[in-house]
Amino acid sequence: MRQVYLDYAATTPVKEEVLKEMIPFFSENFGNPSSLYTKGSASKEAIMIARRKVSSLIGADENELFFTSSGTEADDWAIIGIADALKSKGNHIITTGIEHHAVLHSCEYLAKNGYEITFLPVDKEGRVRAEDLENAITDKTILVSIMYVNNEVGTIQDIKELCRITKSKNVVFHTDAVQALGNVKINVKELGVDLMSISGHKIYGPKGIGALYIKRGTKISDFMHGGAQENKKRAGTENLTGIVGFGKAAELAELNSENHITKVTELRNYFIDQVFEKIDDVFLNGSREFRHPGNANITFEFIEGEAMLLYLDLLGISVSTGSACSSASLTPSHVLTCLGVPVEKIHGSLRFTIGDPTTKEDIDYVIEKLVEVVAKLRAISSVSKAKGW
Amino acid sequence: MRQVYLDYAATTPVKEEVLKEMIPFFSENFGNPSSLYTKGSASKEAIMIARRKVSSLIGADENELFFTSSGTEADDWAIIGIADALKSKGNHIITTGIEHHAVLHSCEYLAKNGYEITFLPVDKEGRVRAEDLENAITDKTILVSIMYVNNEVGTIQDIKELCRITKSKNVVFHTDAVQALGNVKINVKELGVDLMSISGHKIYGPKGIGALYIKRGTKISDFMHGGAQENKKRAGTENLTGIVGFGKAAELAELNSENHITKVTELRNYFIDQVFEKIDDVFLNGSREFRHPGNANITFEFIEGEAMLLYLDLLGISVSTGSACSSASLTPSHVLTCLGVPVEKIHGSLRFTIGDPTTKEDIDYVIEKLVEVVAKLRAISSVSKAKGW
Amino acid sequence: MGMYNDKVMDHFMNPHNIGELENPDGIGTYGSPVCGDMMQISIRVQDEIITDAKFKTFGCGSAIASSSVATDMIIGKTIDQALAITNKQIIDELGGLPAVKIHCSVLADHAIKAAIYDFAQKNGKIYAGLEGFDPNEDDEENDTCDTEE
Amino acid sequence: MGMYNDKVMDHFMNPHNIGELENPDGIGTYGSPVCGDMMQISIRVQDEIITDAKFKTFGCGSAIASSSVATDMIIGKTIDQALAITNKQIIDELGGLPAVKIHCSVLADHAIKAAIYDFAQKNGKIYAGLEGFDPNEDDEENDTCDTEE
Ligand SMILES: Cc1ncc(COP(=O)(O)O)c(C=O)c1O
Ligand SMILES: Cc1ncc(COP(=O)(O)O)c(C=O)c1O
């Protein structure tokens, strides 16, 4: 049976060249980078090279990039670290309702500890309105955290414009660019952000490695306390192979950037067009214009996402859903909720994300099977167009 | 030239079997463990198996083990997480002066935030005295953190006895067992600890993966906020290959435990005996009886450690030193300082740590070269036995 | 698949008794699309015995599997026997459900009662097993989307 | 090695001018074992020219390399020229030192001065380049183990 993975926003396979680059650092060049002997310096050097590559992908200086264990840790560090460092200045943080849980839950943790959090609304395409941000800033505001590209609906924010607003008010700006990396051209200097979170496993690098860009001069407290790694800002023996892999993945992403974006966009558009042509009562969630190149988040009315997901899985197709049934907390997607999608329709949403290895044949196969699955589930369903919801 | 790595306490090479176990999870079975489809469940299952193996090595139940990005993170989480969870109960934490920086710096961070920290002294072998602990506990004490095995001098604490004291006073006990893992038989239930930190890269597993044992029922705040991974206690996409590797390394460590300890102890004793026989004016730091099987921490009087380390490195030998010259902060080893070693002699300390791959030939080579290097540096030195310090 | 056992998957992939009976003797719906699960069961009754049952379900895999197995279970049973079926029995019949999916079995058990309630209303019958069961009252409860029972 | 460049490593591996001159015209020590670095330089002086110099150093790689290059640098120089040598010049001669090791070059520059100071004391000489230099006063400073300059 054909296997079609369409969940590249969840995670990506490590590319062959990336794994190849990592291999020597497991058992041969395994020295602790903090060690003074040759075996240690070799590891240190490998990290330096990787840091250069990852920095280059986002237009940062090498010494502004700090490796973390994940995008989650980068988000946590940015938010909790800035909140702590600037607590004498204020206790107000602005974010949005559509952030990743790493940002949302860090903010909720801070809310329990005396900070005030404003969750900005978004329009029905998932975009933050500049005036909403402008109006939300008070003289107690110390941090604004707005994600670059949303992980569920793929909406891209105008980070440059939002940064312009915070800069004029002297407020620190963090962006979670985990989904943006490799999928949108990023230059931290042009954007003007102070902090940016990224993660390796979304760009065909290994899981368990991320990074936080911290603009030179930004005051931020440490999050991980211990040894003097990462220029004394992030403790813990370095995930040597993870860092090397992230470096190589970043290098490939940079080389391949335009190709990747063009190819994935085309396939994605073909997919959406096909779905709309062949299946009734569907709609696209998010923005058509400001959208992650590989993302198609579609609601199939009158049926539920987990059931679709399982049927598709049995047919070799991997996708994800915003249905409550699929989430650990049994609540429907907070992102689709923020976009104003009615709850019963959130349950019927599927996210397809296309990646480098996806082919047109894959898409055709998925369309064929999707048509069948949707028909089958609609036949079973207790709701329908005729009956209504 | 022969290459002899004698810094297994700093990090270890990934064993061939470990890497082999990891490989399929990079590019084939790369699914996100949080995903509902088959590719995700396969990853989830791999994590479950690894969790079972690591738990087994320390005698824990599977659902008491939480993967982290390092021993450092496990230490940070234990200390900051307990401090936060029990802040209504008290603000006093007891630790020792010889802890790893991950514990020390977490405590220092808390000290800046209203907590009181007591740093227990140790005797000249590096052992905590039970009565010191007993006397230090007040009705405000919420946590005691004492490392199982010290990373520099290898001193093993009587954790069971120390736990008995805290238990009688209802105080939570954390132990940093990063150096103990694989080198001492560990059973969390027999020891009676509430929390234990461990790390993969010290037992021939990969770097960037650790774990925190949290006894069922222990109240602890989250450290990493975000997704629902690790039973909702530790967010972030799982380091799948890291976890799988840690699992395999733990399995091997358990199987190989007695062999490993016996072999390494023998070689280490042979090494110490040879050094004492062939080189004058040396002494062993730490305890002879309660000692990590592979650890030999030796002071060579009248010469400095970094210089020795560099000469040895040029001869293919990798070791570490407690000399200020070698540390990022240019302060001499805080551990040797706590043991009461005079500072000028701390500069002359070298730590040799023997591991599974070490052979008698390696040791003989090191002894031969060590004799030469010490002689050469003593000839250059401005201090000597004759002149005095 | 991991999450569901083979029995659940089998009922999910090839559900029994799909559809809606024509002119059913009783028909009831339970749950709500807002909560992600809505189950409709229709039954045919002859001499207090449920001779046929069909379901239509909007919901996740375990809701569909629960519907399938629940309709299987009531066919051939007396009304009283059907009313005695607990969500626990549905789970057992399925060989177990993940903890977070237990509410789906509750849904099925309630949908059976709702269909029998309709039958009772239409025929002026009273069943001890329906005591305290009010599909409308429960509707309200549904709005909170109880996920655990 | 990574940390040190080839020139430093070369001076470290094969240091020049090791030892202590017999009956030196001047001998001085700088640093302290407590701080991890102590350097002794002895000099032979003829007609205000340093004709020979030797060192003994307890210390790290860069301290040994600095000693080696510093003694090289003063041999053949006049006292005044030797006194004019700055730690910056020693670093340059070594092709650079890591930031955390700069203090080792300061040590060497001070050890030269200490040796000349001893020579000046013994011979009742006064050098402008020694103005403000007091090895004893500096000894005290040493106890704080200054690591940056
Ligand atoms: C937008 C966004 N932020 C943060 C994260 C967390 O990154 P990681 O998976 O490396 O913890 C993810 C992915 O899971 C993401 O999509
Ligand atoms: C005693 C001890 N604790 C904690 C750590 C930190 O663990 P990791 O290197 O995984 O961050 C180490 C090793 O570096 C250690 O030896």
Image (cartoon, coloured by chain):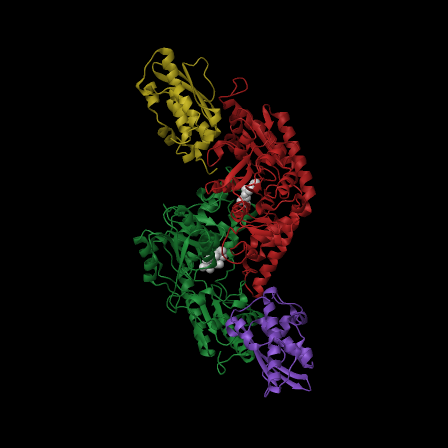
Chain colours: A green, B red, C purple, D yellow
Vertical order, A287 against A220 (above or below): below
Q: Quadrant of the N terminus of chain A?
A: bottom right
Could you tell me if residue A4 is visible in this image? no
Vertical order, B266 against C38 (above or below): above
Q: Tell me where residue B344 appears, x and y as whole percent.
A: 51, 26
Could you tell me if residue A244 is visible in this image? yes
Q: Tell me where residue A174 appears, x and y as whole percent.
A: 39, 54
Q: Tell me where residue A317 appears, x and y as whole percent.
A: 54, 69
Say left or right for B389 vs A195.
Answer: right
Vertical order, B182 against A130 (above or below): above
Quarter residue D121 falls in: top left
Which residue is at 37% across, 31% downward? D92
Tell which of B181 and B338 is nearer to you: B338
Say left or right for C58 vs B248.
Answer: left
Q: Can you name the residue that lies furthest to the top here?
A: D123
Quarter residue A276 falls in: bottom left
Tell which of A14 and A72 is nearer to you: A72
